[in-house]
Image (spheres, coloured by chain):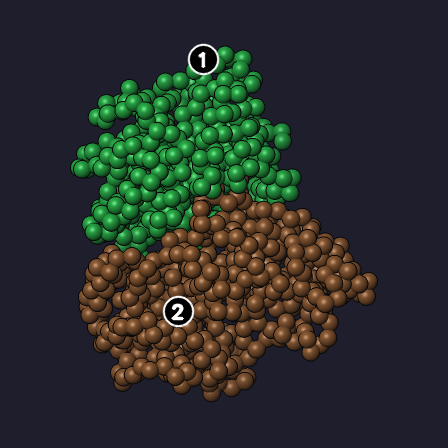
Chain colours: A green, B brown
Amino acid sequence: MNYNIITPEVLEAITAIVGADAVVLQHNDLEKYSRDETEDLVYYPEVVAKPRTPEEVAALLKLCNKHLVPVTPRGAGTGLSGGALPVKGGLLIAMERFNKVLEIDEQNLQATVEPGVITEEFMNQVAAKGLLYPVDPASKGSCFIGGNVSHGSGGPRVVKYGTIREYILNLQVVLPSGEIIWTGANTLKYASGYNLTQLMIGSEGTLGIVTKIVVKLIPLPTLDALMLASFATNEEACAAVSAIFRAGIVPSALEFMERRGVEWVKEHDDIAFDLHDGIEAFLLIEVDGTNQDVIFTDCEKINAVLEAYHCKEVLFADSSAQKEELWRLRRTMAVSVKSNSIYKEEDSVVPRAALPQLIKGIKEIGAKYGFESVCYGHAGDGNLHVNIIKGKMSDEDWNNKLKFGIREIFELTVSLGGTLSGEHGIGLVQKDFMPIKYSEVHFALWKGIKKVFDPKGILNPGKIF
Amino acid sequence: MNYNIITPEVLEAITAIVGADAVVLQHNDLEKYSRDETEDLVYYPEVVAKPRTPEEVAALLKLCNKHLVPVTPRGAGTGLSGGALPVKGGLLIAMERFNKVLEIDEQNLQATVEPGVITEEFMNQVAAKGLLYPVDPASKGSCFIGGNVSHGSGGPRVVKYGTIREYILNLQVVLPSGEIIWTGANTLKYASGYNLTQLMIGSEGTLGIVTKIVVKLIPLPTLDALMLASFATNEEACAAVSAIFRAGIVPSALEFMERRGVEWVKEHDDIAFDLHDGIEAFLLIEVDGTNQDVIFTDCEKINAVLEAYHCKEVLFADSSAQKEELWRLRRTMAVSVKSNSIYKEEDSVVPRAALPQLIKGIKEIGAKYGFESVCYGHAGDGNLHVNIIKGKMSDEDWNNKLKFGIREIFELTVSLGGTLSGEHGIGLVQKDFMPIKYSEVHFALWKGIKKVFDPKGILNPGKIF
């Protein structure tokens, strides 16, 4: 596709749509829009516009569609697959001014929010009304709910509550043609034509730009318990995971963490917690509910499973401060790894019981290609974040040889019945690996769908396929 | 679209693919394939084929695609929107021989089933292993799980457990080209390209034919309680529904039934239950779990809400036989209505708190157009099955005037934030009403998607749009 650059005439039209104060042009000011949280990748847009209304987004898309200017929508820029990087230059549409919770409907347990609302702020607002929105990625304190929709985001509580797919009822979307539609209805069930809402979720800003989101809420659980279990081997920790579900328990979080990750968090952040010798991995396990006896019984059952899988020690958090601290251990892991080394992150997901084979295989591939890795993530979902550490690897090996190792990780993932990404999306950095799992038939269907929504291919080009 | 009839050459090819014993040709034998459970509609296919393997389905589709022969896939024929009716003649592909549960994977809490498995048989098989597959439409004893996928089915337990969308992990699909693909991966999370699994769910056999289904299972709740609450007015019963959720309870079923429906079930079926004067509506409420105290507390809280909404009487089922009987009251309602009168069924769904306005409006529209209705359904989801009774309406009014009344029902549904179908699909009988809710932009997107999957339009023509 041959795109056009933004001419003075197009820039004038952009400025007329959003106002001069909502246009970013200077190289220095563009810098923060040139990267997201994906490795050290940098791509500058030509211009950034910050619209405030769906109508402004519509006018911008119509303009760019006419002039064949590439458009990259951007949420908070916390993505890990390069989805918000403007790889073809052009216009970047920053959604940061769409930052309002428009309605919390306590009659229907629904809310309508704009895509630029920070996920945790929204969670707190609904929690204040006794309601739960459970989709809380590790970046919940900074990511936007619109970005979560675009990536089909998850987080620790998917294991009990499901991904964002189960909470999005309806979306207002601006298409590249400038048309504004609602994808569905504000209802809990929907069997009225192809489900455009579900199609938009996880489409990574390539089909349309989301401008309003109708969310389902549920009653807030009032109680929880949190435990940290330590294991001598990664495999034993991973094997315990599916055994917990087989015992009839559905925890509200079931996270895996490798020792190295925990060490780095402790260096980076002051967390009071003794790391004993002979421990290779941890499971962080939460159960929630409304009845203390049920939670206690669940914890006892989990404890019995952990013992059967040779758990070394179980630490029960005995205060909300300690719970907070243990969660911080898990939530700051990505940041700690990043501050310790150049790294690449993969988002492998497999059927839950295949986790031991996955982690064993990743370490073997690392040994073969000479890289170390720190693995952690949503073990209850079979979803492992694989942080590949540059460490002592030469630049030559890092830049040219590593990709074959990553390919082997994905080949292993796929051979175990899994796929390339569970919640981070494909974006820019995983797309070359998609043919490992998907055939030409899949690509033809995806590209066909893309063409239906975006015939000229202006929206977030260079992503997914 | 100008389709071709099945020529002797095409028939010979069909027979060569599936074998002579799997081809139905005689008018008498075709009769059962000429109708589903939708009103009294009858459309004969030219030929029925009963393939046994995905490869046979692929060969049939390739053949029909080449010769422009329309193809209608059929599950158990229990649909209520005419989705399985071969309105353009051609080949009907009956999936009844795809009737095997291929695997119940207790390690991963997943199962792989063929689409012709009867939903209840599958539920029973997984329940025997302590697992729950909670998607149980009223027709669970006869419908196929493949048909449930095609319609995005629900049932009473959606209110707690979600629709079939939340339980389908991966689908094997045959495209009209004859290509066989898996739409996704056997994983609990998926962020790897446009979600073809979700797109297939609810597409009513218009995009491809599902030949294998990978299902998520969850631990089976071991306890439940069931209560039947009676109200003097429909509006009070409906108003109590959203109040139950606002009290922090998520029941495992919350069904509404109008008096007339209950009366007809009692005439049709011997159910021991006294129907007192002055009662207009009932709520059937179930809570489930693993702890008797929690269930008891939930029941008490529900009872308090019911009293606040002027409930006349609450009957607690005190044995599994009585639970079975009360459920039979609800599950046989459609059959009882059907045996009492010619009727049409609509599947309105609105935000839960709008139910009182919906039912009030339906009765007003009925008064205006001279029809009576029996309403019942999944009130916890805001989903009401509206059975319009012919009763004393003249044939002239029934055939020519009623459609304007139905249009008003859907206009009301849409004005309340709802949509035309919550779980029955659009199929043949609702499609003329789709423009009430959806614009030309929606139709263009849907038709565009259809063309990507089925460029010649051979699959289930005449449905949805």
Which amino acid, by three-letter code, is at mark 1?
A: Lys
What residue is disc 1 on? Answer: A392
Is residue A134 visible in the rendered image? The answer is no
Location of residue B390 with respect to A349 vertically, above or below: below
**Measured from the top left, where is residue B267 in percent x and y?**
40, 86
Residue at 60%, 55% (x, y): give it.
Answer: B211
Residue at 47%, 87% (x, y): give it.
Answer: B392
Q: Residue furthest left?
A: A319
What residue is disc 2 on? Answer: B377
**Measured from the top left, where is residue A40 in percent x and y?**
45, 20
**Measured from the top left, where is residue A399 in percent x and y?**
53, 17
SS of the residue at dot 1?
A: loop
Q: Quarter of the image containing the N terminus of chain A?
A: top right
Residue at 22%, 76% (x, y): give it.
Answer: B312
- Considering depth in this image, is B206 or A320 the residue closer to the camera? A320
Horizontal placement of A220 versus A66: left or right? left
Is residue B308 visible in the rendered image? The answer is yes
Residue at 27%, 54% (x, y): give it.
Answer: A106
Task: Return the chain for callout 1.
Answer: A
Horizontal placement of A199 versus A96: left or right? right
Q: Residues within 10 Å of mark 1 (few under 14, many from 20)?
A: few
**Measured from the top left, where is residue B76 in percent x and y?**
56, 67
Looking at the rendered structure, the number of numbered marks drawn on it comes to 2
Location of residue B396 with respect to A216 vertically, above or below: below
